[in-house]
Amino acid sequence: MADASAKRVEIVMRYSTVVTVYALLSATPAFAAGGGAIVWDRETEKYGASWNQPTPKRAAEAAISQCGASGCKVVLKVRPMMCGALAISGDSKKAGTAVRKDLDTARVAALTSCQKNKGATDCAVKTADCNK
């Protein structure tokens, strides 16, 4: 009888270990997800953004494609479950970016970052969003 009870305990322990390992491995892709990107070309005044992409490389490619100018460069990488924003000055020569946990805070931080540039006036948020 003691052998049967010990056997049950061993089976339950193994099952618990398998369930725990499965749960940890299932969560890994969420942390490895790509997120989003914001790109900007100061010369053409164009910008682009992508969100909820499977990889960082795909996020950059999608944002560059949306921008449509050969000079578009990634100015911000946005991790999963984070929000990003791009603010550009009135003359389109200065910019500020920010990543935060919520959209409103990201917008305000991007505006603040833009306004810190010497000579930047009339900064406005041009794109902002959040990744899942």
Image (cartoon, rainbow, N blue to C red):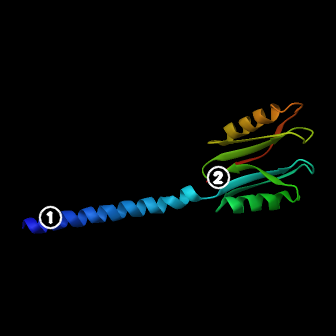
Residue 115 lies in quadrant: top right
Residue 117 lies in quadrant: top right
Quick one: label 1 or label 2, which is nearer the N terminus?
1
Q: Residue at x 29, y 65 (%)?
A: 15
The N terminus - image quarter: bottom left
Disc 2 marks a residue whose amino acid type is Asn
Disc 1 from disc 2: Cα separation: 48 Å
Residue 5 rendering spot, x and y as whole percentages: 13, 65
- Return the residue nearer the eye: 72 or 100: 72
**Which-is-in-front pick, marks 1 and 2?**
1
Instruction: Determine contact: label 1, label 2, CB under 8 Å.
Output: no
Seen in the image, is 2 located left or right of residue 43?
left
Residue 83 numbered mark, or none: none
Q: In this view, does 124 lie above or below 15?
A: above
Tag 1 residue: 6
SS at circle 2:
loop
| Crowd tier of the residue under label 2, counting other residues whose Cα lies within 10 Å: few below 14, some 14–19, many 20 or above | some
| Crowd tier of the residue under label 1, counting other residues whose Cα lies within 10 Å: few below 14, some 14–19, many 20 or above | few
Tag 2 residue: 131
Disc 1 marks a residue whose amino acid type is Ala
Seen in the image, is 36 located left or right of residue 44?
left
Residue 27 rendering spot, x and y as whole percentages: 48, 59
Q: Which residue is drawn at 75% across and 38% down?
A: 110
SS at circle 1:
helix
Residue 72 rendering spot, x and y as whole percentages: 84, 55
The C terminus - image quarter: bottom right
Residue 111 rendering spot, x and y as whole percentages: 78, 35
Q: Which residue is drawn at 64% across and 52% down?
A: 131
Q: Is residue 115 above or below residue 54?
A: above
